[in-house]
Image (spheres, rainbow, N blue to C red):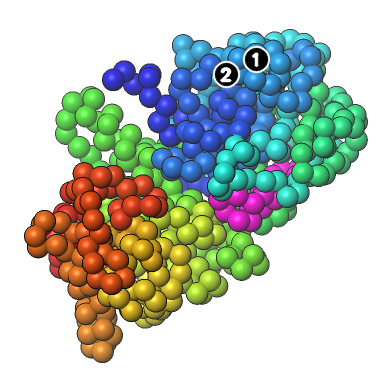
Amino acid sequence: MDASSLSGSNFPGATLPFGFVQLSPDTQDNPDNPASGYDYNDKTIVGFSHTHLSGTGVADLFDVLFMPTTGKIQANPGSADKPDSGYRSRFSHDQESAHVGYYQVKLLDYNINAELTATEHSGYHRYTYPKTDQAHLVIDLNHTLNKKRPYWSCKVIDAEIRQVDPYTVQGYRILTGWAQLRKVYFYAKFSEPIQSNQLYTGGSMYPNEKIVNGTNVKAVLNFNTENGKPLLIKVGLSEVSVDGAKANLAAEIGEKSFNQIEVAAKEKWQKELSNIAIEGTKEQKEIFYTGLYHAYTQPNNLADVNGDYMATDYTIHHAPDKTHYSTFSLWDTYRAAHPLYTLLKPEKDAGFIRSMLRQYETFGYLPIWQLWGEENYCMIGNHAIPVIVDAIFKGIKGIDVQKAYQAVKNSSMISHPGSPFYLWNKYHYMPENKQSQSVSITLEMAFDDWCVAMLAKKLGKEKDYQYFIDRSGYYKNLFNKTSGFFQAKDDKGNWLPNFNPLAYGGNGGNPFTEGNAWQYLWYVPRTYRVW
């Protein structure tokens, strides 16, 4: 299949390894599918937002959208089939390019060349407008995922845009969505003075005001580009405060030029990606390093440059190591990505684990699927456990082993979504009529228990070892010797009828999670092994 026919779920914009900011184009005004916000098949771009996810099945983020325009002032994105109806613009892949730490596209409806680069907490925009006294910049704080989605719907609770002076704008937006409460603060510096503005809230316009707030907040900033100079915009982000965003921007960009930041971004990626070298064809190397690049785009360091971050109790905490990582898609990453980090990025892996332990300290158990520092309970099991145990067995430095053991043990004792231990302890398997995805949950919880048992044994905790090694064998209760597959039972111990080993299970209403009986047949022998 031709690559151009696939949308994928990756963003082409600028980011740094494990960085907070992913400055990238969005091709839809309510991004949903693909979850990255960028669909290669789309013909228009609605703007450039500063945070994105890569490879996920659910959309979120898309924070603080900027869109340069000319001519008629437009405050709404319009529709893709009628680009002139809003601020969006047509674009062509022939006039689009990207490399690590850099993205460029020509906005055809405005004859604007847009270029993006980034630091860990900041985005850097360079917009080359035609010479005109009608150059505009749209800031849309209501740009977010599809608000009509039946689950994980996203809603802006509060937002604000404030013009501080002719060269500075700051603001924030607070949302609920896949992450139940997210706070995003920004601080933007412009190379050219703002001539005038139109601020919007709730659909009403307020020209030349200094501040506007509400749930549907936008701004159109007006510039004069007749001098032929590009408009440079430096934007710092923070999840803590506007002051944090300002400090992040000053520390990482300061007075540096766009080109200096672009070169620095490329050098940082070169350093990160070059710690493993392979032999092969050009195509094989492109495939390998593309995969490695994607592995290094997440998790993301949410902590400000001074180490402050918002914890799961919604209070501001301080990380002595100046890092607090999130975006832990653990069901997807514990099998391969995290073992890879132990080999290629052991110091980062230790930072990931310290961040997971901070959730345990404030939340009571380890992450399942953590986004923006918050638990969203997506997927099954508690696969921070094998990530932590694997790192300890491999001797990764920088981990408090005793604290880690208490976290993995207690996270295996407290029932929570995706890990219903009250059923586990009562039935010694998951009954499908009590818990959907029962076979997958049984197998994966058994593996998690085996990991706890192995760490208990290593630390000389014999009583705990015996308890968890016994629980780790519960998977055997769902193996049907007659069919040769793991199958679902009800709470009476009866096999469910109409078994089909090829039947695919999604996220509910089926004994399997994103797989079938054939695929999960290999789960146990593949993972039950000694490190």
Percent x, y for residue 222? 81, 23
Please state the horizontal and vertical placement of residue 101, each as a whole percent of the image: 48, 33
Q: Which residue is mark 1?
A: 83
Task: Identify the image quadrant of the C terminus.
Answer: bottom left
Per the model, the C-alpha gap separating discs 2 and 1 is: 7 Å
User: Among all residues in the image, which is located at the extreme bottom?
Assistant: 463
With 450 as the anchor, is 108 left or right in this view? right
In the image, the segment drawn in magenta is 168-188
Q: Residue at point 43% right, 76% down?
A: 414
Instruction: Please report the residue visible at 28 percent of the width from the left and 47 percent of the height from the top.
Output: 515
Relative to residue 272, is residue 65 drawn left or right? right
Question: Hey, what amino acid is under mark 2?
Answer: Thr
Q: Examine the structure image and report whether residue 63 is included in the region drawn in magenta.
A: no
Name the chief secondary structure element in magenta: strand
Q: Label 1 near label 2: C-beta < 8 Å?
A: yes
Q: Position of residue 468 (x, y in %)?
A: 26, 79
Q: Residues within 10 Å of mark 1 (few under 14, many from 20)?
A: some
Q: Which mark is residue 44?
A: 2
Question: Is residue 502 left or right of 175 when viewed as pictured?
Answer: left
Task: Kindly tell me whether residue 208 is visible in this rendering.
Answer: yes
The answer to which quarter of the image holds residue 73 is top right
Numbered label tally? 2
Q: Looking at this view, is 279 or 134 the one in front?
A: 134
Mark 2 or mark 1: which comes first in sequence? 2
User: Residue 410 at x, y = what percent?
Assistant: 40, 78
